[in-house]
Image (cartoon, grey):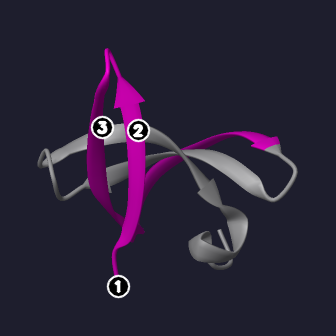
């Protein structure tokens, strides 16, 4: 199941479809979110995104 995250940069909004089962690295935690290097189906590349920790399962 993919997660959709929208980001606005330079006035353009892009929706990233992320695959939380494909996480390469974890970084900072802030509240209920964790920064993760996760596979982006939209760009077919690894990208850093803040993800709700419940979406990451038991990582």
The span from disc 3 to disc 2 (Cα, nearest Å) is 5 Å
Q: Position of residue 36 (x, y in %)?
A: 54, 46
Q: Residues within 10 Å of mark 2 (few under 14, many from 20)?
A: few
Dot 3 alpha-carbon crowd within 10 angstroms: few under 14, some 14 to 19, many 20 or more = few
In the image, is residue 52 part of the stretch drawn in magenta? no
First along the sequence among labels 2 and 1: 1
Q: Residue furthest top?
A: 10
Q: Which quadrant is the C terminus positioned in?
A: bottom right
Mark in the foreground, 2 or 1: 2
Q: Secondary structure at mark 3?
A: strand
Q: Start and end of the magenta stretch?
A: 1-29
Which residue is labeled 1 in the image? Answer: 1
User: In the figure, residue 17 lies in which quadrant?
Assistant: bottom left
| Residue located at (35% from left, 22% from top) | 9
What residue is shown with label 2? 7
Badge 1 element = loop
Q: Is residue 36 left or right of residue 59?
A: left
**First in residue order: circle 1 vs circle 3:** 1
Residues marked 3 and 2 touching at CB (< 8 Å) = yes
Which one is earlier in the sequence, the residue at label 3 or at label 2? 2
In the rendered structure, are the residues bearing label 2 and label 1 in contact, judged by CB atoms less than 8 Å apart?
A: no
- Who is closer to the viewer here, 57 or 16? 16
Tell me the distance, in whole angstroms, between the alpha carbons under discs 2 and 1: 20 Å
| Disc on res. 13 | 3
Question: Is disc 2 placed on a helix, strand or loop?
Answer: strand
Disc number at residue 24?
none
Residue 39 point in image, percent of width and height: 29, 54
Quarter of the image with the N terminus in it: bottom left
């Amino acid at each position: 199941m993919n997660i959709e995250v929208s980001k606005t940069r330079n006035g353009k909004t892009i929706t990233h479809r992320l695959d939380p089962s494909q996480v390469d690295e974890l970084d900072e935690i802030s509240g209920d979110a964790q920064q993760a290097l996760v596979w982006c189906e939209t760009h077919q590349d690894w990208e850093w995104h803040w993800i709700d920790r419940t979406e990451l399962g038991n990582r």
